[in-house]
Amino acid sequence: MLLFASTAGEADAQQMSRHTASPATMNMAGTEQTAYVVPGKPEDISPLLVGERIPVVTLPDALGNNVELNKAIAEKPTVLIMYRGGWCPYCSRQLSGLQEALPELEKLGYQLIAVSTDAPAALMESATKEKLGYTLLSDADLHLSMQLGIAFKAPKTYWEMLTRTTGGKDTGLLLPVPSVFILDRTGVIHFEYINPDFKQRMSADLLKAVAASVRNEL
């Protein structure tokens, strides 16, 4: 199983493995974009690495209002969560755990933003059901997930559901590998946790510990 969990001190080793292990290609912000080759398996993704900057994107929130992600990130250091959707029980548990961690993350000076394939109406359902106090954004066409290098072709058993839950926007029938990124105000990645096994999520306690340890870098 391919597992990415790194801080800035491990970025060089990751950079070497990234260019030898995956068919997916990705561009850094400010460079010429390369066509994204969709991996057939989550183990074959090629994500952005620590030290790289997330792309400039605009995504709708749970009310359907467009949010410029990079402007939002510029306000304060950010914990960015990429998850599959509210239909996933592992994601729902993760969202609930993040809500419990939110007060401590905010005391450290962070904001929490979670992005999924769900259409805005489904985001509102998740926010209401889990009583979430942080921002949910929709990446229903997986444009952001592809630019982050975490999208892969979903198994056929998901295709009908994804067409429905994304409002028909997931035309490539893709899924994101669940991921956690800690970003500074410029969108540079200082920590990431990416596990192709969607059943394995970073615990809230570990997230709080890592967020505290890298806070002085941001």
Image (cartoon, rainbow, N blue to C red):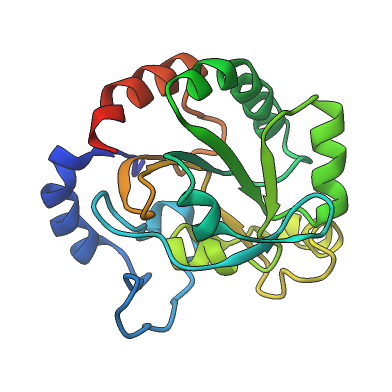
Q: Where is residue 8 in the image (x, y as percent from the top left)?
A: 19, 41
**Would residue 9 appear left or right of 115 to someone viewing this image?**
left
Going 76% across and 62% down the picture, which residue do you hit?
A: 159
For the image, the number of numbered tags is: 0
Would you say 2 lies left or right of 105 here?
left
98 w.r.t. 153: above or below = above
> Farthest residue toward the front?
75
Q: Which of 49 and 16 is in front in this view?
A: 49
Image quarter in which the C terminus is found: top left
Q: Residue at x 63, y 59 (%)?
A: 154
- Residue 126 place in picture, x, y as percent: 81, 36
Q: Foreground: 127 or 163?
A: 127
Quarter of the picture containing the N terminus is top left
Q: Position of residue 121 (x, y in %)?
A: 88, 51
Question: From what the image shows, is residue 90 above or below residue 64?
Answer: above
| Residue 23 horizontal side relative to residue 101, left or right | left
Which x, y percent locates residue 73? 48, 50
Rendered residue at 80%/57% (across/down):
119
Residue lying at 36% horizontally and 55% vertically, measured from the top left? 186
- Please tell me in which quadrant of the rendered image residue 210 appears: top left
